Amino acid sequence: MASKTTNPFVFLQQVRSEAGKVTWPSRRETMISTVMVLIFSLLAMVFFFAADQLMGLAVELILGIGR
């Protein structure tokens, strides 16, 4: 397979051209996405905390070890 080399200046021109085609989210979209990520992170935290507590309790009751 032949390797095709590109001039670094041409490469930077291409990168700049491609970056100009990107559709960036608005400030509102970014804020909504951020809030959603925080909410789902909080929900995951609560779920895994509750699951850990329940499994710890089950192990303690069944095996009599832990805590």
Image (tube, rainbow, N blue to C red):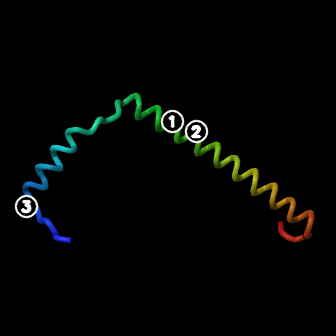
Q: Quadrant of the N terminus?
A: bottom left
Relative to 27, residue 55 above or below: below
- 23 lies left or right of 35: left
In the image: residue 11, left or right of residue 23: left
For the residues marked 1 and 3, what is the alpha-carbon distance in whole angstroms? Answer: 43 Å
Q: What residue does disc 1 label? A: 35
Q: Residues within 10 Å of mark 2 (few under 14, many from 20)?
A: few
Q: Name the residue at 16% across, 43% down.
A: 17
Across and down, in percent, residue 65 comes to 87, 71
Crowding at mark 3 (Cα within 10 Å: few <14, some 14-19, many 20+): few
SS state under label 2 = helix
Q: Nearer the viewer, mark 1 or mark 3?
A: 3
The answer to whether the residue labelled 2 contacts the one labelled 1, judged by CB atoms less than 8 Å apart, is: yes
Q: Which residue is mark 3?
A: 7
Percent coordinates x, y for residue 50 in the rendering: 75, 50
State the CA–CA distance, disc 2 to disc 1.
6 Å
Amino acid type at mark 3: Asn
- The secondary structure type at the circle numbered 3 is loop
Taking 21 as reference, is 44 left or right?
A: right
Q: Give whichever of 55, 16 is nearer the camera.
A: 16
Q: Is residue 25 left or right of residue 40?
A: left
Residue 53 spot, x, y in % from top left? 78, 56
Q: Quadrant of the C terminus?
A: bottom right
- Name the N-terminal-most of marks 3 and 2: 3
* CA distance separating discs 3 and 2: 46 Å
Q: Residues within 10 Å of mark 1 (few under 14, many from 20)?
A: few
Quadrant of the rendered image containing residue 60: bottom right
Secondary structure at numbered mark 1: helix
Q: Earlier in the sequence, mark 1 or mark 3?
A: 3
Q: Quadrant of residue 64?
A: bottom right
Question: Which disc number belongs to residue 39?
Answer: 2
